[in-house]
C-alpha cells in the first residue's frame, strides 16, 4: 500500500523512503506515484469483492485502465480486454465482459482483477494474495501466466502469499515478515531447509502434511514456548472414528438438488438457463467433516446457499434430522438458523460495517436467547474472540479497522457463538496466515470433539481439505463427479477432473526430504 501511495498520509506516521528506478516516490511524491500507478507499478488486491466497482461492468473497468494509462481507444480497449480475459482463463469472456462483479464467483472476480493489473504490462507487479480465491488448476494457470509475462517483459514481482509451497516454487528470494518487521530473508532453499527464526520454523511446521495427519497442528505460540508435541492421528484411529460416525442415521440428506438461474433474452432470443447445481445428492453424518472441492464457479457456494435456503432450490429436497426442510416457511427457517450456521467466504460484506465486532457477535446470541444476561453474553463474546486468536480490545473495533484475516476470525467466532449442529465453512481459512490457519483448524477440530459439531468444509487448499475431511465431494460444473473417503480419493482419484486437481497442488520444498542433511523444523 505504501509503494502504491494508497496509505492515508494524514493518519499515518511515515519514516524512510521508497525509490523506483533510482527516483524517490514516497512519501512526498504523490503526483509521480499517480502517473506510475497502473502503468509502471500495478497491484492485484487481496479482496476483489471490494476492489472492483460494483456499479460498473467488469469489461468497462478494464477498458478504463487501458484508455487512461495505455492510450487505447474504446474499440482497441475492448479487444485487448477480451484477450486478457482469455489469458486469465475466464469462461465466456464476452459474457464476463458484460457482467457486473456481483454476478461472478469470487475466483472469477479475482481473475478480472489480475487481467486489469497486467493490462498495461507494468515493470513492477505487486500481487497481494492473488490466488487466494482460485482453485489449484486455475492457480497453476495464473502463476504460469505471470511467469510468461515476466519472461516476456522482464517484469518484477512482489508476491505476497500465505501459501508456502507456492511461494517456494516461484520466488527467487523470500522475506518473512512478523509484527511489521522482516525477521528472515534468503533463498527458498535456505528458508525451507534451514530456517533460523522461530516464527519461520512455526510457519513451516504449521502447514498440514498430506502424508501425515497430526491431531493438532503447530502454531507460533506452541513452537516458541516449545509446548508443541506432534501426535499422529493414525489410519486405525481414523477408521475406528468413522465406524462410530457411520453407524448413526444421517443428520443431513440431500436428494437430487438443483438450482437453475434464468437470464433474460436479448430482444427476441431464447431465455438462457444456467444450472449452477445439477441433480446433487449426498448425506452428512453427525460429527463428520465433509470436504467440498472444485474450481471457482463450479457451484460450491450456490450449493450451500441452497442448503441453507439463502437461495430457493429449483427442484430436489433437503432433509435435516429426517424432516424435509426445503418446504419450511420463513418463520420455521428462522428458528432453525441456530442449528445450521455459515462462515461466509467474504468476511467484509458479511459483517455490518456500522456495528462493532463485539456487537456483530452478540447480535445472534441475543436473537436466539443464548446466555442468561447481556453481561453473560459479553463474557462469552470475549472468550470467543480469544479462542480465534483476537484479544478483547477487538470487540470495540469496527470491521474496516481489521485486516481480511482478522475479519474472517470474527466471522468464525460469530458462527460458533450459537453452538450449532452444522457449520458450513465457505473458504473460512483462505484469508488467514498459515499459523493462524493452524490455530483456527485446531479450534474447529477441538470444538467438533467437544460439542459434536458437523462441518461442510469448502476450500481451494486441497491439503487443508484432506487434513480436515472424513468424506470428500468433488464438484465440476454443478455436478458431483466423485464422492468418497478423503484419503482414498487423494491416494487413488477415479475421475480425470479429480486427478487434474490433485496433480496441480504445489509441491514446494519439503523439509522432510532434506537433501542437505541439515535439521528440519519438524525434527
Image (cartoon, helix red, strand yellow):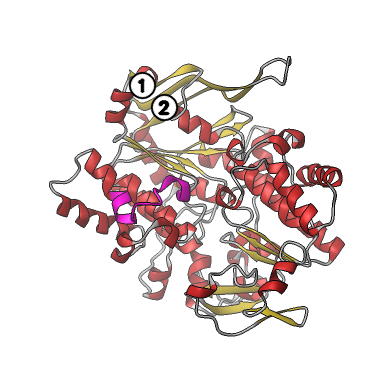
The N terminus - image quarter: bottom right
Mark 1 and mark 2 residues within 8 Å of each other at the beta carbon: yes
Query: Looking at the picture, how far across and down is residue 337, in whole percent?
Result: 32, 33
Q: Nearer the viewer, residue 384 or 2?
A: 2
Q: Is residue 348 magenta?
A: yes
Residue sitting nearer the eye, 229 or 469? 469
The label number, if any, that marks residue 81 in the structure image: none
- The x, y position of residue 115, in whole percent, is 73, 50
Q: Position of residue 246 (x, y in %)?
A: 37, 30
Vertical arrangement, residue 345 with respect to residue 260, above or below? below
Question: Circle 2 sits on which residue?
Answer: 309
Q: 398 or 468, which is in the foreground?
A: 398
Q: Residue at x 38, y 54 (%)?
A: 410
Residue 112, position in %: x, y?
A: 69, 47
Give the side of residue 375 with respect to residue 161, left or right. left
- In the orientation shown, which residue stands out farthest toward the bottom? 16
Please indicate whether residue 267 sits to the left or right of residue 211 in the image.
right
Query: Which residue corresponds to mark 1?
Result: 325
In the rendered image, the vertical position of residue 298 relative to residue 440, given as above or below: above
**Does the magenta segment cover residue 168?**
no
Residue positioned 75% across, 82% down in the render: 23
Task: Tell me: 90 left or right of 512.
Answer: right
**The magenta stretch spans which residues?**
347-361
Mark 1 or 2, nearer chain start = 2
Tell me the SS state at disc 2: loop
Give the CA separation, mark 1 to mark 2: 9 Å
- Can you tell which quarter of the image residue 298 is in? top right
Amino acid at each position: 500500500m505504501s509503494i502504491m501511495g494508497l496509505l492515508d498520509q494524514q493518519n499515518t506516521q511515515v519514516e524512510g523512503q521508497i525509490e523506483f528506478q533510482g527516483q524517490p516516490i514516497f512519501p512526498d511524491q504523490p503526483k509521480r506515484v499517480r502517473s506510475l500507478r497502473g502503468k509502471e507499478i500495478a497491484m492485484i488486491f487481496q479482496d476483489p469483492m471490494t476492489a472492483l466497482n460494483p456499479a460498473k461492468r467488469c469489461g468497462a473497468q478494464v477498458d478504463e485502465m487501458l484508455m487512461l494509462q495505455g492510450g487505447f481507444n474504446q474499440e482497441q480497449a475492448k479487444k485487448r480486454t477480451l484477450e486478457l480475459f482469455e489469458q486469465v482463463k475466464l469462461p465466456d469472456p464476452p459474457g464476463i465482459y458484460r457482467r457486473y462483479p456481483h454476478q461472478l464467483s469470487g475466483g472469477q472476480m479475482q481473475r478480472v482483477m489480475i487481467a486489469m493489473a497486467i493490462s498495461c504490462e507494468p515493470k513492477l507487479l505487486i500481487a497481494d494474495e492473488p490466488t487466494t480465491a482460485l482453485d489449484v488448476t486455475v492457480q497453476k494457470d495464473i502463476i504460469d501466466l505471470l511467469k510468461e509475462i515476466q519472461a516476456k517483459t522482464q517484469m518484477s514481482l512482489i508476491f505476497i502469499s500465505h501459501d508456502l509451497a507456492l511461494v517456494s516454487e516461484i520466488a527467487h528470494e523470500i522475506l518473512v515478515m512478523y509484527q511489521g518487521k522482516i525477521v528472515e530473508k534468503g533463498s527458498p532453499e535456505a528458508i525451507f531447509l534451514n530456517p533460523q527464526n522461530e516464527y519461520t520454523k512455526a510457519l513451516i511446521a504449521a502447514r498440514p502434511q498430506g502424508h501425515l495427519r497430526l491431531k493438532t497442528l503447530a502454531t507460533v505460540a506452541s513452537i516458541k514456548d516449545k509446548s508443541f508435541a506432534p501426535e499422529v492421528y493414525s489410519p486405525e484411529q481414523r477408521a475406528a472414528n468413522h465406524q462410530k460416525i457411520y453407524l448413526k442415521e444421517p443428520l443431513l440428506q440431500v436428494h437430487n438438488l438443483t438450482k437453475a438461474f434464468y437470464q433474460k433474452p436479448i430482444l427476441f432470443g431464447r431465455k438462457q438457463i444456467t444450472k449452477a447445481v445439477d441433480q446433487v445428492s449426498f448425506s452428512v453424518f453427525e460429527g463428520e467433516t465433509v470436504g467440498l472441492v472444485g474450481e471457482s464457479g463450479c457451484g460450491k457456494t450456490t450449493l450451500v446457499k441452497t442448503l441453507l435456503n439463502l437461495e430457493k432450490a429449483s427442484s430436489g429436497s433437503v432433509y435435516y434430522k429426517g424432516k424435509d426442510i426445503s418446504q419450511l416457511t420463513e418463520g420455521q427457517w428462522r428458528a432453525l438458523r441456530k442449528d445450521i450456521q455459515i462462515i461466509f467466504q467474504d468476511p467484509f460484506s458479511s459483517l455490518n460495517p456500522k456495528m462493532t465486532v463485539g456487537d456483530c457477535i452478540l447480535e445472534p446470541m441475543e436473537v436466539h436467547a443464548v446466555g442468561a444476561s447481556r453481561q453473560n453474553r459479553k463474557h462469552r463474546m470475549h472468550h470467543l474472540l480469544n479462542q480465534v486468536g483476537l484479544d478483547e480490545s477487538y470487540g470495540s473495533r469496527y470491521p474496516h479497522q481489521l485486516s481480511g484475516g482478522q475479519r474472517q476470525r470474527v466471522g468464525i467466532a460469530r458462527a460458533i457463538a450459537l453452538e450449532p449442529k452444522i457449520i458450513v465453512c465457505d473458504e473460512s481459512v483462505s484469508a488467514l496466515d498459515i499459523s493462524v490457519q493452524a490455530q483456527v483448524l485446531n479450534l474447529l477440530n477441538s470444538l467438533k470433539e467437544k460439542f459434536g459439531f458437523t462441518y461442510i468444509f469448502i476450500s481451494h487448499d486441497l491439503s487443508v481439505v484432506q487434513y480436515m475431511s472424513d468424506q470428500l465431494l468433488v464438484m465440476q460444473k454443478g455436478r458431483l463427479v466423485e464422492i468418497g473417503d478423503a484419503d482414498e480419493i487423494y491416494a487413488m482419484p477415479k475421475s480425470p477432473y479429480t486427478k487434474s486437481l490433485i496433480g496441480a497442488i504445489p509441491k514446494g520444498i519439503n523439509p522432510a526430504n532434506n537433501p542437505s542433511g541439515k535439521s528440519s523444523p519438524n525434527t
